[in-house]
Amino acid sequence: MNYSYLAEAHYALGHREAAVCVACLGMYLLEQIQAVEWRQAAGLLTILQGQMGDEAFQQAKAQGRSTLIKVIGVDGYDHLPQLLTQYRETSG
């Protein structure tokens, strides 16, 4: 949950790139322990992607790639788009 809260703080401060990175960590790690709160981080990522546009969002994620891989590994990094798709398909 700390990653999700940190992502929201970065978002509130206008640090979108940092928010993308830590929201990805929160989303993935929470989903891995089957905590429903992963959807909170996924929702923030969806908002960020809408505000930034897909290209800037993907660039922000790519910039944080090394940090993300250190924490969640390559498999975790590769799983992020699937989680976002799952979130979008099951949300309103």
Image (spheres, rainbow, N blue to C red):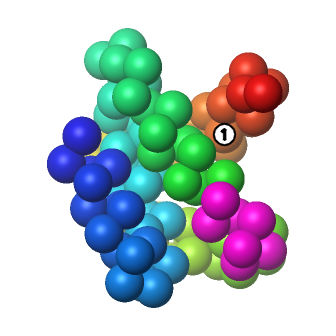
Query: x and y percent of residue 60 in the render?
Result: 57, 76
User: Could you say which is closer to the camera, residue 71 or residue 28?
Assistant: 28
Residue extending furthest toward the left: 2
Residue 84 in view here: yes
Query: x and y percent of residue 52 in the render?
Result: 71, 77
Say which quadrant the N terminus sits in.
top left
Is 5 left or right of 42, judged from the image as shown?
left
On the image, numbered disc 1 is attached to which residue?
A: 84
Is 37 left or right of 46, judged from the image as shown?
left
The answer to whether 92 is drawn above or below residue 33 in the figure is: below
- Name the residue located 46 percent from the left edge and 39 percent from the top edge: 40
The answer to whether 88 is drawn above or below residue 52 in the figure is: above
The answer to whether 29 is drawn above or below residue 36 in the figure is: below
- Name the residue located 65 percent from the left edge and 59 percent from the top edge: 47
Say which quadrant the C terminus sits in.
top right
Residue extending furthest toward the bottom: 14
In the image, what residue type sits under mark 1? Answer: Leu
Figure quadrant of residue 54:
bottom right
Is 16 left or right of 6, judged from the image as shown?
right
The answer to whether 32 is drawn above or below residue 73 in the figure is: above
Mark 1, residues whose alpha carbon is within 10 Å: few (<14), some, or many (≥20)? some
Is 71 left or right of 7, judged from the image as shown?
left
**The magenta stretch spans residue 29:** no
Residue 82 in view here: no
Figure quadrant of residue 89:
top right
Q: Secondary structure at mark 1?
A: helix
**The magenta stretch spans residue 51:** yes
Q: Which residues are magenta?
A: 47-53
- Name the residue located 76 percent from the left edge and 65 percent from the top edge: 50
- Name the residue located 30 percent from the left edge and 69 percent from the top edge: 9
User: Could you say which is closer to the camera, residue 67 or residue 19?
Assistant: 19
